[in-house]
Amino acid sequence: MSTTIIRSYLQQKHTKFRTRRALRQFQEKRIQKILQEVIPNSPYTKERCIGRNMDTWDTIHPMEKSEMMTNFDRLNTVGVSKEEAIAMAKKEEDSRSFNSVLDGYTVGLSSGTSGQLGLLLVSQYEQEEWVGRILAKVLPEHLFYPKQDRVAFFLRANSPVYERTGSKRLAFHYFDLAKDIEEHLEPLQKLNPTLLIAPPSFLRHLVPFIQNGTIRLTPQKVITVAEPLDIVDERLFRSVFKQTIHQIYQATEGFLATTCEYGTLHLNEELVMFEREPLDAQRFVPIITDLYRTTLPIIRYRLNDVLRLRPSPCSCGSLLTAVDAIEGRCDDILLLPQKDGTQRPVYADFWRRCILMSDARVQDYGLRQVQENRLELFIQADEEDEVRTRVEEALHTMIRKRHGEPVDITHVYDWPKGGRAKKKRIERRIQPS
Ligand SMILES: [Zn+2]
């Protein structure tokens, strides 16, 4: 294990703030340092900062993914072109080898659920620093604990950095989500991981094999990644693994949140500064600034996610902001047609709650808006027809209460299960009018 990983692990372990004010001061100091390093080498950041003092960085116009991609060549500080980076990432993706580096930098490609490509560009140092911090946040025992953790990692793409963490203390095993689940069962059983890390959609596939006794796993900790953890999945996994289910919320743009011992998500505010663009009293869209990365600087970057604040403080006592849920993409807020011809946004969580509360027998669900006045509903349950009718009625009632125009609800009997693509339960397929 490299010294960078160990050093950043220890730094992370020992970074504690007594007050929000101290945290805020720390963030400000980091941002000033980042700006000083980035501005001379990133022509695009320099342009974004024109006419501002360094201490008014928080007035820079927020950047989104499309802007980042358009200006990628002038945004990164190491002169890598977008074409080179995409070509490299695609080659890796096709060969599934994930070992190549471009001029010493690692490239990652995220397909994104909205179809917009996202590119990640990090130096080896940044990558190792990031791994050290993740380990500090998620390892159940201290890094110097004398017992080995066997980590099973189900991801869409591997990274050599995980293998560099291999040691007597940690054995990392990458499982490629592009393969069929049957191929994974035997090696997974053989490993019997102490730490099981996978997207919820994959764990859902795995559950029947555990329930029918094909495999027996005894993980000490289960962590979901890559997709928001829906409450139906959380309940199912908790009953199958008999423990709190943990989450890592990470995007191409950074390591954003992790759960504490109580299973509450806390924003990683010692690594990323979060500004909030409020949607309502509880919900916001984050604008993030990465406090460490400079190869591809993330300064005032608007994520496409809706986060819901936790109304009460978490019992763990952490002063890092607690969130109840990542509710999904902004693009997936359904738009209800109103009598006056306008559209009213209704957040994913309202649909989710409406569906789950209408009938306790719901095991899985999906809802997508395919036309302004047409929704498609997927329900999996025992006594499925009866449950489906009740959910449908509940949805009509909720729409009426929100003064929406009536919509047609069509039942569908199959729903994308995830795998190489991310699973979405609430989805909008129309553009705002
Ligand atoms: Zn907590």
Image (tube, helix red, strand yellow):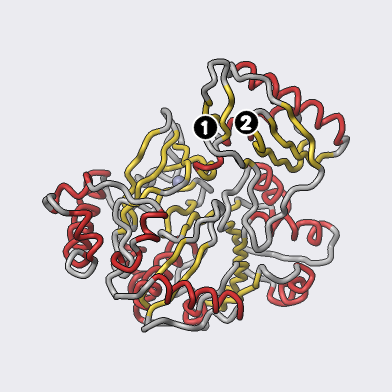
Along the line of sight, which residue is nearer the eye, 243 or 22?
A: 22
For image coordinates 73% across by 72% down, the residue present is 184
Q: Quadrant of residue 201?
A: bottom right
Q: Image quarter for residue 172? A: bottom right
Image quadrant where residue 124 sits: bottom left
Q: In this view of the protein, can residue 246 be seen by the observer?
A: no
Q: Residues within 10 Å of mark 2 (few under 14, many from 20)?
A: many
Q: Which amino acid, mark 2? A: Glu
Q: Secondary structure at mark 1?
A: loop
- Is residue 285 or residue 259 the one in the foreground? 285
Asked if the residues shown at circle 2 and circle 1 are in contact, with their CB atoms under 8 angstroms apart, the answer is yes
- Name the residue located 70 percent from the left edge and 41 percent from the top edge: 366
The total of numbered circles placed on residues is 2
Q: Earlier in the sequence, mark 2 or mark 1?
A: 2
Q: What residue does disc 1 label? A: 433
Visible residue check, residue 299: yes
Q: Which structural element holds mark 2? A: loop
Compared with residue 377, is residue 245 higher up or lower down, i.e. above or below?
below
| Nearer-the-camera pick, 237 or 199 | 199
**With respect to residue 9, does 302 lie above or below?**
above
Between the residue at mark 2 and the residue at mark 1, the CA separation in whole angstroms equals: 9 Å
Residue highlighted by disc 2: 372
**Residue at point 77% right, 75% down?**
186
